[in-house]
Amino acid sequence: MKNKFRTLSKIALVLIYLVIVAGAIVRMTGSGMGCPDWPKCFGYFIPPNESSQLLFEANHSYEKGMMILMDHEAFLVAKTDFMSGEKFNASDWEVYSKHDYTTYDPVHTWVEYINRLIGALSGIPILIFTVLAFWFWKKNKWIPVISVLTLFGMGFQAWLGKTVVDSNLAPYKITIHMVMALLIVAFILYLIFASKTTYKQQKYQKRFYNILILALVLSLVQIVLGTQVRQFIDEQTKLLGYQKSLWLASPELNFYIHRSTSILVLVLNGYLWYLNRSNTLGFNKVKLVIYCVILEAATGILMYYFDFPFLSQPLHLVIASILFGIQCYILFECLHKKREKQLA
């Protein structure tokens, strides 16, 4: 049973990272409003493939919540289940008033819909391992507690996803959505670590521990700043179109802070690598941290100096999320060794 719990936790972690990847692609393609409602898409469990499916049809069975697009001016929503007559009857419909988005693009719709499907799929292993987590109650009560928090976190993410759509992609809600995803990653990584039966030979060092916490907080700050820079780019895209060379011609202060802080990220994580190696602490995943930092810097350089090559934006975000996850896991390893030292 414990092995199944650990396997399900790993599956959930992979799926959560796939959600982050899908979310990054949604932002890159501007597909955030591909489905103007939630949890369905245009009122359907499977969204339409072409715009003609959103036109009014005579003698057609409509269910409550299904949407039609009237003259590209407004989405109308069926008030109840009904069968349409030969002519359009306005009393059967009401204007979808949660936002004023009135566009249908099949690519954007399916990109957003797939993102939602992956999110829903990721909830399945989380639900199952939350039930299995209570097998650990006597050994480690934190495992069922964190499992339940993870499940509630997924519920909060689903609700927040709805509010993001209803607000027509309010920037601060997108940022909260991203931070919550990282918190769920941290929860699942704890469950993977805490359910281990054997642990590596490692040494606790206070300086390494303190620098690691600082580096982890800085990574989170960088991700938040990055989402704000991304929002600025979205606004520039709407204003200037796809003239990529102009997107960062006159950036806001957040961009300069984000870019300058990246140097501190490199220095801190490089120092962690030095401390780990010079003191033979045994935290081998620090190497992966350095690889992520280098790749993160490389994608940042590509975006700024080479006009946002294809996939550079989602890669930048995904690598930052992976970096955060690895740092969290090293922190759990470090905390474990700290407790062992205190009990010795």
Image: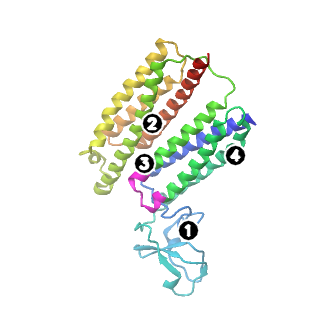
Find the distance from the CA under tag 4 to the CA under tag 1. 29 Å
Q: Residue 256 or 296: which is nearer the viewer?
A: 256
SS state under label 3: helix
Q: Earlier in the sequence, mark 3 or mark 1?
A: 1
Q: Residues within 10 Å of mark 4 (few under 14, many from 20)?
A: some
Please give the range of residues in magenta. Answer: 163-173
Task: Report the side of 137 relative to 97 (left or right).
Answer: right
Q: Residue at x 49, y 69 (%)?
A: 51
Badge nearest the viewer, 3 or 2: 3
How busy is the neighbourhood of tag 3: few (under 14 within 10 Å), some, or many (20 plus)? some
Rendering coords of residue 78 (x, y %): 54, 76
Residue 74 locus on image (x, y percent): 42, 73
Q: Disc 1 marks which amino acid?
A: Gly
Q: Considering only order in the chain, which callout, 2 or 1, is on the residue closer to the N terminus?
A: 1
Q: Residue at x 54, y 52 (%)?
A: 156
Alpha carbon separation for disc pair 4 and 3: 28 Å
| Distance in Å between CA atoms under marks 1 and 2 | 35 Å
Q: Nearer the viewer, mark 4 or mark 1?
A: 4
What amino acid is at disc 4?
A: Ile
Q: Is residue 336 left or right of residue 262?
A: right
Quadrant for the N terminus in the image: top right
Read off the residue under disc 2: 320
Query: Would you say residue 234 sits in the magenta stretch?
Result: no
Q: Amino acid at mark 2?
A: Ala
In the image, 55 versus 341, the foreground residue is 341
From this view, report whether residue 323 is shown above or below residue 313: above
What residue would you read off at disc 3?
175
Task: Judge from the rendering whether residue 250 lies leftward or rightward of residue 135; answer left or right.
Answer: left
Q: Mark 4 — residue?
A: 128
**From the viewer's perspective, is residue 239 above or below residue 95?**
above
